Image (cartoon, helix red, strand yellow):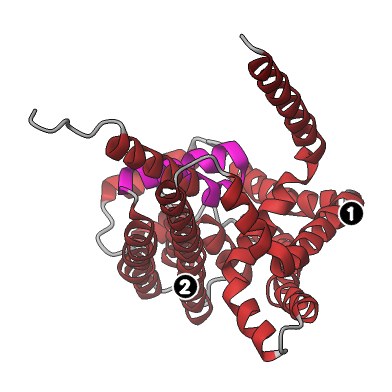
Amino acid sequence: MNRQQLFSIGFFAVLALLLYQIGLMFLPFLFPVLWAVILAHLAFPAYVKLAAWLRGRETMAAATLTIGVMALVVVPLILVGVLLVREASSAEQAIRHWVAAGGVQQVSDYLARMPGATGLLQELTGRAVMKQVNLEQFVLSSAKTLSEFLVNELSALVRNVFLLMADFLVMIFTLFFLFRDGRRWLDSLYDLLPLEASHKEKIFVRLDRTIRAVVKGLLLTAVVQGLLAGAAYALLGVPFPVVLTALTMLLAPLPFGGTALVWGPAAVYLFLVGPAGKGLVLLAWGAGVVSMVDQILKPLFIGQGAQINVLLLTFSVLGGLALYGIIGLFLGPVLIGLFLTAIQIYREEYHAPENGK
């Protein structure tokens, strides 16, 4: 081993140590920065147009668009969160009044009015109520748990307001510089990668395509499903439509259950306390329209845009959610997309069949 090789080993060892320490130092800011990267990537075409309209004033364009993103994304989320917690507390009180008025004991009577209700179903339900299966306690505890969860989450945010504001400021601060300097940083990273130009192009093209497809697929699908379901909740007289609409949007990205976890119980509620026709309408609307939107838009945006198999897409969403939280809904498919690109490069460069064999 000559002197040059020893120097190279020492240099890369020091570089690896520095990267490790810098990674530990920047780890607390990882998720705010990732959210900023996602927002900047989606809004960057608007930044380019705004900078051109402002005659190349990049700093002004970046500041203007950062404020615009705050107004369009952050402020509505805060307002919805406040409404969600307020209506959740009201929902718990309404459920308590319903139980106190004997609503649970009358479940079997409600079932008798349902279309196609059988004597066996009524008998089993009556036995469950008469045998004191603690159904009232279950309903009350479930309502209390949901309400306390939402209120405690808001309280936790208030208690940790410093950390919340710090993460928010990190995201906004990073977003501004990503708008203004992101293109130059990306060009520098592109040049530093020790890969062939064709490989780097494939990776960056796949990364861009996957991020856009995943974000559009998940967010647009969730918003559309939530609005469609929310309109039905309001028109059919389901209590607390804001809470249910927010929950519908929140659960929409889940591959299993999804929006049915919200509009299904709401339809059962209408069957029990209102005209059965309303329950049938919500059931048909949820299964035939709200859930079908998921089957149409997600494959359209994610499957075709990101070119990811439905099975891999499902596991990547679930695994990303379990590992990284909400942002894992986006990171999971992105990581799968990059992995598939690496497999494609390996197949083309190292696994290609030899000529004549």
The residue stretch that appears in magenta: 309-332
Q: Residue furthest left?
A: 356
In this view, 85 is above or below 329? below
Q: Residue 195 placed where, x, y %?
A: 48, 41
Q: Is residue 213 magenta?
A: no
Quadrant into which the C terminus falls: top left
Give 281 or 93, whichever is nearer the viewer: 281
The reply to whether residue 106 is in sight is: yes
Residue 286 - label: none
Amino acid type of the residue tagged 1 in the rendering: Val
Amino acid type of the residue tagged 2 in the rendering: Val
Quadrant into which the N terminus falls: top right
Q: Residues within 10 Å of mark 1 (few under 14, many from 20)?
A: few
Seen in the image, is 250 located left or right of residue 143?
left
Tell me the distance, in whole angstroms, between the alpha carbons under discs 2 and 1: 31 Å
Q: Is residue 326 magenta?
A: yes
The residue identified by callout 1 is 161
Give 226 or 3, whichever is nearer the viewer: 3
Give 316 or 271, whichever is nearer the viewer: 316
- Which residue: 80% across, 76% down? 59
Instruction: Residue 264: name its quadrant.
Output: bottom left
Callouts 2 and 1 close, C-beta under 8 Å:
no
Seen in the image, is 244 located left or right of residue 9?
left
Q: Residues within 10 Å of mark 2 (few under 14, many from 20)?
A: some
Residue 224 - label: 2
Circle 1 SS class: helix
Q: Residue furthest top?
A: 1
- Which residue: 30% across, 31% down? 350
- Which residue: 34% across, 44% down? 123
Q: Main secondary structure of the magenta part?
A: helix
